[in-house]
Image (spheres, rainbow, N blue to C red):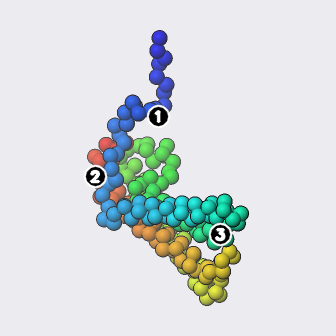
Amino acid sequence: MTTPPESGAQLDAASPLPPDLPAADEPAKVPLAIEDWATVIIMALLACITFANVLVRYLSDQSFAWTEEFSVFLMILLAMVAGSAAVARDRHIRIEYFTERGSALRRKRLAQLGALMVAALFFLIAALSLRVVWDDYRFEETSPGLGLPQWWYSIWLPIVCTGIGLRAVGLFIRRSRAPLAQEEGQA
């Protein structure tokens, strides 16, 4: 006697993909591969740095002091780049109970509002973090671990936040141009 299939997601290879799952990323003017390759490069650097530190610890019972500082910086940069990819692909966090209910026009307007709010937030963070970078440079702040100029690390925050803001503007434009019939098909 067989047991009835369980409800919910099936994680085996025999389960077909849901039909409403999009096959590929929607086209964008700026290639989405930028974030993908940046993620690959950052992950490779993290793996190499960590592996080198493990080898040195194993062979000499000491570690590279610089690896922790660079690893923390790379992990923060990785999170920001992944955030940019999530915004560009419209995979950022939202409360789908509200965004997926109602008419196609309502869903379209909520998608536009969400994109505008993300853009405003990250442009604001970019503007405010420019002051932090300027202060780091002006007062010659150094990093606690290696004594490198702190602005070498902090300069990336406004750059990546501006990138995320621009990705959100691009998402807003794509959502504005999308016909309502296409929005109905995605629900």
**Looking at numbered disc 3 in the image, what kind of residue is underneath it?**
Phe
**Looking at numbered disc 1 in the image, what kind of residue is underneath it?**
Leu
Q: Is residue 158 above or below residue 58?
A: below
Q: Hey, which residue is sitting farthest top in the picture?
A: 1
Residue 103 position in % (x across, y down): 37, 44
Task: Tell which circle, 3 or 2, labels the residue nearer the N-terminal end.
Answer: 3
Question: Dot 1 corresponds to which residue?
Answer: 11
Question: Dot 2 corresponds to which residue?
Answer: 179
The local crowd at label 2, few if under 14, some if 14 to 19, many if 20 or more residues have their Cα within 10 Å, is few
Q: Is residue 12 above or below residue 61?
A: above
Q: Quadrant of the C terminus?
A: top left
| Quarter-of-image position of residue 63 | bottom right
Residue 111 position in % (x across, y down): 41, 54
Residue at x 64%, y 87% (from the top left corner): 140
Separation of disc 3 and disc 2 at Cα?
Answer: 55 Å
Question: Dot 3 corresponds to which residue?
Answer: 64
**Looking at numbered disc 2 in the image, what kind of residue is underneath it?**
Pro
| Labelled pair 3, 2 in contact (Cβ < 8 Å) | no
Tag nearer the camera, 2 or 1: 1
Residue at x 41%, y 43% (from the top left corner): 102
The local crowd at label 3, few if under 14, some if 14 to 19, many if 20 or more residues have their Cα within 10 Å, is few
Residue 27 position in % (x across, y down): 30, 58
Q: Hey, which residue is sitting farthest bottom in the picture?
A: 138
Q: Is residue 4 above or below residue 25?
A: above
